[in-house]
Image (cartoon, helix red, strand yellow):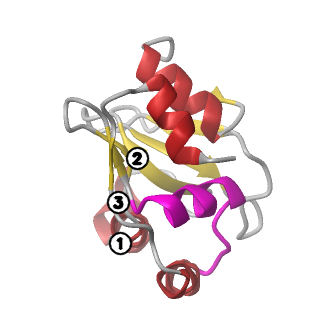
Amino acid sequence: MNWKEHIQAICARASFSEPAEEQALFAAETQLGMRLPQSLRELLGESNGVRDEHDFTLIWPIERIVADNRSFRESESFRTLYMPFEGLLFFADAGNGDQFAFAVVGGQVRRSDIFVWNHEDDSRMWLAKDLREYLEGWVSGRIKI
């Protein structure tokens, strides 16, 4: 799939970054201790982060994916406030504190499903069957949280 073309078809004024280099993707996987989902890896290989026409982030750059996931997993205060975050791989946020994620099972992303983590009640709710459905639903407003 050509991610940039697909995103432009659903969000004509989306803005894209330079592609993430393979070395950066590999380093991110090493730091996270898991392989990135193929769809996310491919998208980042076309654009290291995507923003919509309002300059809102649809997909974080790889650097933020690593930083935020490590922060959530390593924070001592989060360990007392929330369930463990090892079961999630965050890749974007809703702008209100809630975050979008792939589910991690046994240290790896084994399915393409997308979940939303609610920062207020620590719930994790299924949202979309894959990255494509998440993008289409979020951009169109069909997905609301």
- The answer to whether 45 is drawn above or below residue 23 in the figure is above
Name the residue at the left extreme: 54
Q: Name the side, left or right, on which 17 lies relative to 44.
A: left
Where are the magenta residues, as a range? 33-48
Residue for point 33% across, 71% down: 76
* SS category of the residue bearing label 2: strand
Q: Position of residue 122 (x, y in %)?
A: 44, 39
| Residue lying furthest top | 142
Residue 101 is at least partly visible in this image = yes
First of labels 2, 3 by sequence position = 3
Is 5 included in the stretch rendered in magenta? no
At label 1, counting other C-alpha atoms closer than 10 Å, the crowd grade (few under 14, some 14-19, many 20 or more) is: some
Pick whichever, 31 or 60, lies toward us. Answer: 60
Residue 57 against residue 41 in the figure, above or below: above
User: What residue did someone put label 2 on?
Assistant: 92
Residues at marks 3 and 1, CA–CA distance in whole angstroms = 21 Å
Q: Amino acid at mark 2?
A: Ala
User: Of the residues under marks 2 and 1, which one precedes in the sequence?
Assistant: 1
Residue type at mark 3? Phe
Tag 1 or tag 3, which sits nearer the N-term? 1
Q: Which residue carries the number 1 mark?
A: 63
Q: Nearer the viewer, mark 3 or mark 1?
A: 1
Q: Between residue 79 and residue 128, name the one nearer to us.
A: 128
Q: Is residue 47 in the magenta section? A: yes
Question: What whole-number distance in Å separates the C-alpha atoms at marks 2 and 3?
Answer: 19 Å
Residue position for label 3: 78
Q: Using the rendered view, name the quadrant where residue 97 is placed.
A: top left
